[in-house]
Image: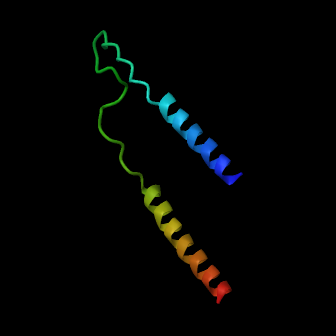
């Protein structure tokens, strides 16, 4: 039964990859004046909260690692 499940999964993944392998459609040429967008083209700055979230995430990883390590010992 496990072999059949693996075979069905492999065929499903193969079919999905073929379905998503369509060539890209050509883009229409922009018309009119302007830059064709609504921004300046500059990359968005990284806000300060991203750094805070990264520090909190690292802190939580360390906390839960120590918590579960002490439970196992």
Work out which quarter of the rendered image holds the C terminus and state it: bottom right
For residue 59, side relative to residue 34 (left or right)? right
Against 12, residue 63 (above or below) is below
Q: Nearer the viewer, residue 59 or 46?
A: 59
Color encoding of the figure: rainbow
Q: Nearer the viewer, residue 1 or 49?
A: 1
Against 6, residue 20 (above or below) is above
What count of labels does the image hold? Answer: 0
Residue 17, image x and y in percent? 49, 35
Residue that extends furthest to the top in the rendered view of this protein: 32
Q: Nearer the viewer, residue 55 or 71?
A: 71
Residue that extends furthest to the right in the rendered view of this protein: 1
Residue 28, image x and y in percent? 34, 13
Q: Quadrant of residue 42?
A: top left
Residue located 47% across and 63% down the image = 54
Residue that extends furthest to the bottom in the rendered view of this protein: 73
Residue located 43% across and 25% down the image = 22
Residue 40, image x and y in percent? 30, 31
Residue located 47% across and 67% down the image = 55
For residue 6, side relative to residue 48 (left or right)? right
Against 52, residue 43 (above or below) is above
Against 73, residue 57 (above or below) is above
């Amino acid at each position: 039964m496990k072999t059949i499940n693996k075979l069905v999964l492999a065929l499903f993944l193969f079919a999905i990859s073929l379905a998503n392998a369509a060539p890209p459609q050509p883009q229409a040429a922009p018309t009119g004046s302007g830059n064709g967008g609504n921004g300046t083209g500059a990359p968005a700055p990284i806000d300060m909260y991203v750094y805070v979230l990264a520090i909190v995430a690292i802190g939580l990883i360390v906390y839960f690692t120590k918590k579960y390590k002490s439970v196992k010992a």
